[in-house]
Image: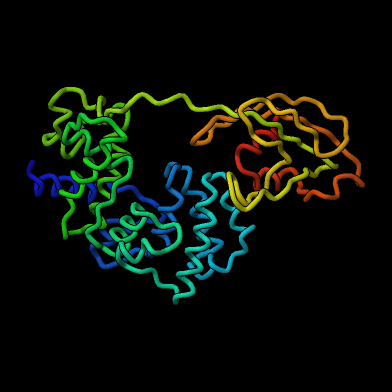
């Protein structure tokens, strides 16, 4: 493969077609000397783990309006940050986000500019370190996300299935990294995978590197990357209690560690393999509101929802929030339970 030709074609395409994203300095502005804000790059990369660009954008805009600098984020109370994170999932990332912000702010508010130094920050793994080093500081880092894996698998028609193919795909991507425009290169690859070399129905006719693509030459680009059949996702069961007092709903802070750690939640039983025999949090006229389903990364959950209304002198051990405020503060699994009727 002609590496220089692939790089030139993809960068030229990026110059024409780069997505306009709120954390991004586009190729024209970058060429004119505007540098990305490392805080915004880092924040966006953490948010984009396990979610889509469209879902992350309103969170990013809200975060940067509320906490425009790493110092401002570092000063945020943990409960406020966790509430603002609700809906982005993987809540350990929110705790690591705050820990990282506090380390950076404590060191003067300047992010380190190498992968090795970035890796030393709380919650910053190999991918995030490479992305921040490349995009914020123009370091020639190998930034490999799911989009890049897909592009490599198709360009080189890699027959090994994921996840076993990951080291090979990463090595292939590394061979394309160069000293020229490394930040733009990283973003060009990601944009190409998201917009053109899509998981389904790739737009091969619009692909700037189609002539170099081994999967297209073989006539089956959608067959890549190969994947092993997934094992069935385990299922757990639980009970969630929606306790209402006037227009308010009872919530409680979940333990700091564990799934949804530190978040506000509805009172709930343990989540177990078999439907639990669970006592309600207080005596009331409980009624069944139907089950809700939610899928986490490692298991699917069926929650039986039970609702009750209580008087003003009951439930003093809970925190009470107006229903609208509760819906905004709760993770999505509990929002589903809250809406169950």
Residue 95, image x, y percentages: 54, 56
> Is 262 on the left or on the right of 62, as rendered?
right
Q: Nearer the viewer, residue 301 or 14?
A: 301
Identify the image quadrant of the N terminus.
top left
Image: 275 above or below 90: above
> Is 319 on the left or on the right of 262, as rendered?
right
Image quarter of residue 180? bottom left
Q: Name which residue lies at 46% across and 50% down.
A: 47
Q: Name which residue lies at 72% across and 30% down.
A: 305
Identify the image quadrant of the C terminus.
top right
How many discs mark residues in the rendered view? 0
Residue 291 at least partly seen: yes
Residue 316, image x, y percentages: 86, 50
Q: Name which residue lies at 65% across and 45% down.
A: 330
Q: Nearer the viewer, residue 75 or 60?
A: 75
Q: Nearer the viewer, residue 240 or 53?
A: 240
């Amino acid at each position: 493969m002609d590496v220089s030709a692939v790089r030139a074609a993809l960068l030229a395409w990026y110059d024409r077609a780069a997505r306009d994203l709120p954390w991004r300095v586009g190729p024209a502005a970058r060429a004119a000397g505007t540098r990305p804000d490392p805080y915004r790059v880092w924040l966006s990369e953490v948010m984009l783990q396990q979610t889509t660009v469209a879902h992350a954008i309103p969170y990013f805009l809200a975060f940067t309006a509320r906490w425009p600098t790493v110092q401002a984020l570092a000063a945020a109370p943990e409960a406020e940050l966790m509430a603002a994170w609700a809906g982005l999932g993987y809540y350990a990332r929110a705790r690591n986000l705050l820990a990282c912000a506090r380390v950076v702010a404590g060191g003067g508010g300047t992010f380190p500019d190498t992968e090795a130094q970035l890796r030393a920050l709380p919650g910053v793994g190999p991918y995030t370190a490479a992305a921040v080093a490349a995009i914020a500081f123009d370091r020639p880092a190998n930034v490999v996300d799911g989009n890049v894996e897909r592009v490599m698998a198709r360009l080189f028609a890699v027959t090994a299935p994921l996840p076993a193919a990951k080291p090979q795909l990463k090595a292939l991507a590394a061979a394309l990294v160069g000293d020229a425009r490394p930040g733009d290169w990283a973003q060009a690859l990601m944009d190409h995978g998201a917009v053109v070399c899509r998981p389904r129905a790739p737009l091969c006719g619009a692909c700037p590197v189609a002539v170099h693509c081994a999967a297209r030459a073989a006539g089956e680009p959608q067959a890549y990357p190969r994947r092993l059949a997934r094992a069935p996702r385990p299922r757990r069961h639980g009970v969630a209690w929606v306790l209402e007092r006037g227009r308010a709903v009872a919530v409680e802070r979940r333990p700091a560690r564990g799934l949804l750690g530190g978040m506000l939640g509805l009172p709930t039983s343990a989540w177990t393999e078999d439907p639990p025999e669970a006592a309600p949090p207080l005596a009331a006229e409980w009624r069944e509101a139907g089950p809700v389903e939610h899928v986490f990364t490692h298991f699917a959950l069926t929650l039986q929802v039970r609702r009750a209304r209580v008087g003003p002198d009951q439930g003093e051990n809970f925190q009470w929030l107006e229903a609208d405020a509760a819906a905004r503060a709760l993770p999505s699994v509990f929002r589903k339970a809250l809406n169950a009727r």
